[in-house]
Structure formats: C-alpha cells, structure tokens
Image (tube, helix red, strand yellow):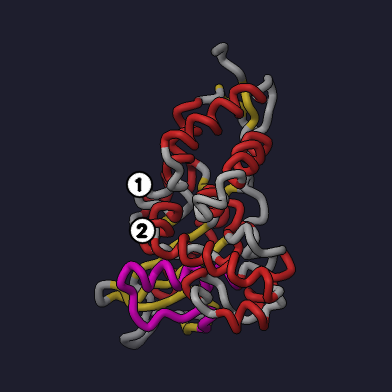
C-alpha cells in the first residue's frame, strides 16, 4: 500500500506502519486471526492526515466485537487511555505507581509523604525502600497523550532531591525518580543520563522496561481498563480506593456497592478474571 502520513498525539507526523499496529495488537493478547482482521480494517479506513487517536478508535471498536470470546483483548489494548482515566487529580495514578514499585520488590511504599531536606521540607508523591535504599518519586500525571515532561520539570525535581539527599539522619532519599504516564522530551533523557542521580520511568522508557511493560509483567491493570463498566462506575470504584483490577476480582459486593447493576456484575467479573489471569 502507498505510504500515508498520520498525525501523532504530540502533533508530529509519521508514516503509518502496519507492523507497529500489529505489535500493539499482539501485546493486547490478540491472536493472529484477530490481528489480521483489525489490520485489514484499519488499512481500509486509512487516509492522509488521520490521527493516531482515530486509528486507535477503529482498532478498539473492532476488538470489542470479539469480547464474547476474548473479553480481555480490547481492555488490554486500551491500557494507555485507561491510565488517562485515572485523572484528573493524579492521586489514583500515584497509588498505581506505588503498586508498580511494590511489584518490583519495593518495601514500605507510601504516597503523599512530607520529608525533611537539608534546607526545607518536601512532599514526595511516592517513597519507599528498594534494594536497601530509600527512593523518592515525583509523579507527573498528564491528561493528554501528547504532553511530555520537559527539561524544566527535571531541573526542578533535581534541586528537590538534592536537598533531600543532604538531609541529616538515616532516612534520607538516596535515589530520585521522575515518573510520567506519557513520554519525556529528548533533553530530559539526555540530562538524566548526564547527572546520573535521577531515574526516569515513562510510558515507553526505559526501552523494554517502561511503564507499559511493567504493567503487563505484574498484571497491574487499572480498573479503568474495564470496557464492561461505565465511566461513573469506574469513578465510583476509584473513590472507593479500588485502583487495580486485582483489588476487585471475584468481589461481587464491591461492584454492587459501586453501582454496577446486578444483571451486569457477572459480565464484569468474567472480564476481571480474564485480565488478571493472562
């Protein structure tokens, strides 16, 4: 097929790559038959200047047609957008990142902790102990996929974590992190590599160890992935501090308390089970 330019969420343009689409479908757990059918549908609908959001919607809606046999694939394909639904306050995302760190072996993980630096006190979004060292995280939640954490953000947090590293006592922060649900600019990555004291965790960074990989490895699926729930029902669960699918799996009562109708609960439980056992 001819090369067709599409528009990314950050406004940049690139040529549509069907292999890239197929890889994302593969990560969702789709089998080869489903992947080929979705790819064919997208290629039929494709036109110059189409946005990645439009492509996503076509793919997502096609995947939903297979939910009766594969209740997890559309949900897993929507993971990036589901993270956005943890907003707008960002607090559920901080809880989500705390869960990610626990899956990596971190201990004594807490959110929203005020810690004393050498000069002033600082509120740390997520902190804990990893490999015997205390870490502190600045968690930047963005409501748009096209928004990137830029250089001024890492310069700001570098000064905060420098102050915390100079704190007196044995509980000082040794490792600072900048975490985001989207991406970093090139200069942020370059600066972090140069200074060596700030670790980065973003949607696809570090390569092959970014947020999307950690989510799938640890099955840390946010409750907002569920296509069987309405936005109101998802919000109710978040307000009940139920951020992860594993917090709800098998629990009929918590779904009922969140306003899910009795005749829909079984369908939600089936999807929860499929997501947490893949």
Q: Measuring from the top left, give residue 248's x and y in whole percent.
A: 53, 75
Q: In whole angstroms, how far apart are the C-alphas of marks 1 and 2?
A: 11 Å
Q: Is residue 277 above or below residue 128?
A: above
Q: Measuring from the top left, give residue 57's x and y in whole percent.
A: 66, 40
Left or right of residue 230, residue 204 in this image: left
Give me the disc on residue 208.
Answer: 1
Q: Quadrant of residue 220?
A: bottom left
**Disc 2 secondary structure class:** helix
Q: Please give the count of numbered marks on the rendered protein.
A: 2
Q: Measuring from the top left, give residue 197's x and y in whole percent.
A: 36, 60
Along the viewing direction, whichever of 173 and 73 lies nearer the viewer: 73
Q: Residue at x 48, y 40 (%)?
A: 25
Left or right of residue 130, residue 160 in this image: right
Of discs 1 and 2, which sits in the foreground?
2
* Camera sees residue 151: no
Along the polypeptide, which appears first: circle 1 or circle 2?
1
Q: Residue at x 66, y 68 (%)?
A: 264
The residue that mark 2 highlights is 217
Q: Is residue 11 above or below residue 176?
A: above
Label 1 Cα neighbours within 10 Å, binned few <14 / some 14-19 / many ≥20? few
Which residue is farthest left?
131
Please tell me whether residue 164 belongs to the stretch shown in magenta. no
Q: Which residues are magenta?
A: 92-114
């Amino acid at each position: 097929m001819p090369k067709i330019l599409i528009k990314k969420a950050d406004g940049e343009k690139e040529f549509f790559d069907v292999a890239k689409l197929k890889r994302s479908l593969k990560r969702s757990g789709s089998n080869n038959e489903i992947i080929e059918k979705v790819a064919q549908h997208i290629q039929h609908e494709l036109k110059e200047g189409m946005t990645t959001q439009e492509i996503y919607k076509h793919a997502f809606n096609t995947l939903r047609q297979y939910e009766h046999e594969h209740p997890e694939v559309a949900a897993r394909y929507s993971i990036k957008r589901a993270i956005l639904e943890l907003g707008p306050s960002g607090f559920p995302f901080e809880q989500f990142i705390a869960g990610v760190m626990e899956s990596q072996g971190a201990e004594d993980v807490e959110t929203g902790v005020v810690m004393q630096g050498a000069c002033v006190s600082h509120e740390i979004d997520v902190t804990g102990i990893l490999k015997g060292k205390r870490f502190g995280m600045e968690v930047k939640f963005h409501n748009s996929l096209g928004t990137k954490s830029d250089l001024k953000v890492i310069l700001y947090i570098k000064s905060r974590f420098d102050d915390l590293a100079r704190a007196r006592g044995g509980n000082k922060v040794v490792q600072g992190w900048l975490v985001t649900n989207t991406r970093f600019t090139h200069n942020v990555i370059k600066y972090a590599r140069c200074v060596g004291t700030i670790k980065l965790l973003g949607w696809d960074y570090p390569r092959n160890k970014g947020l999307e990989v950690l989510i799938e490895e640890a099955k840390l699926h946010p409750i907002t992935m569920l296509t069987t729930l309405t936005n109101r029902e998802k919000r109710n669960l978040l307000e009940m501090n139920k951020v992860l699918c594993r917090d709800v799996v098998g629990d009929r009562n918590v779904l009922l308390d969140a306003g899910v109708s009795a005749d829909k609960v079984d369908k939600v439980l089936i999807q929860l089970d499929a997501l947490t056992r893949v």
